[in-house]
Image (cartoon, grey):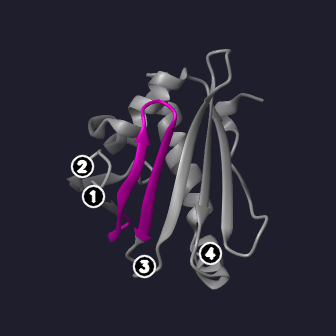
Amino acid sequence: MSTSTKEAVVTTSGDRDCHVERVFDAPRERVWAAYSRVEQLAQWWGRGHQLDIERWEFRKGGHWRFVEHSDGQTHGFEGRFREITPEERIVQSFEWDGMPAHISIDTTTFVDLGDGRTKVVTDSIFHTQEERDGMLGSGMEAGMNESYLALDRLLAG
């Protein structure tokens, strides 16, 4: 099966965590660019729908805020960067307007598989199990997989 049709694998192992893995058919530097360059991010984040980048400060302590427009609705997301290690790791807070003040800390790592593919691993930790379960129940997994398909299209172009 081509990784471009594979969905992200989402698991939990504790009360407050969420672990996501997805392999992309592109070298790590291209996947990193898609995550770190706002002009590329705008093409796939938010399921590929119209995305307003209200703020993008890609540096430690920097703030980001995106608003996705789809089906006559808007969905806002924001956070702050805690750590950025180029082509290796991004640590950031994440908040969805649909669950205000319920913030997760997301650590995303970019693993070079050595064959032109990259595994992206995101570990999220929530304040409570209820917050984690609320995010999982919000449609997060489906939305993330739609975004990853849009990322596949960008990487293939």
Q: Residue at x 75, y 64 (%)?
A: 12
The magenta region covers 70-95
Q: Are marks 1 and 2 in contact (CB under 8 Å)?
A: yes
> What amino acid does circle 3 point to?
Gly
> Which of the two discs, 1 and 2, labels the residue nearer the N terminus?
2
Residue 132's tag is 4
Residue under pointer 2: 57
Q: Residue at x 43, y 63 (%)?
A: 93
Q: Is residue 35 above or below residue 100?
A: above
Image coords of residue 132 (percent x, y): 62, 75
Residue under pointer 3: 98
What is the distance, in whole Å, between disc 4 and disc 1 at their CAs? 22 Å
Q: Residue at x 29, y 45 (%)?
A: 59
Front position among marks 2 and 4: 2
> What amino acid does circle 4 point to?
Arg
Q: Which of the 4 image quadrants contains residue 62?
A: bottom left
Query: Quarter holding the N terminus?
Result: top right
Q: Which residue is at the far left?
A: 54
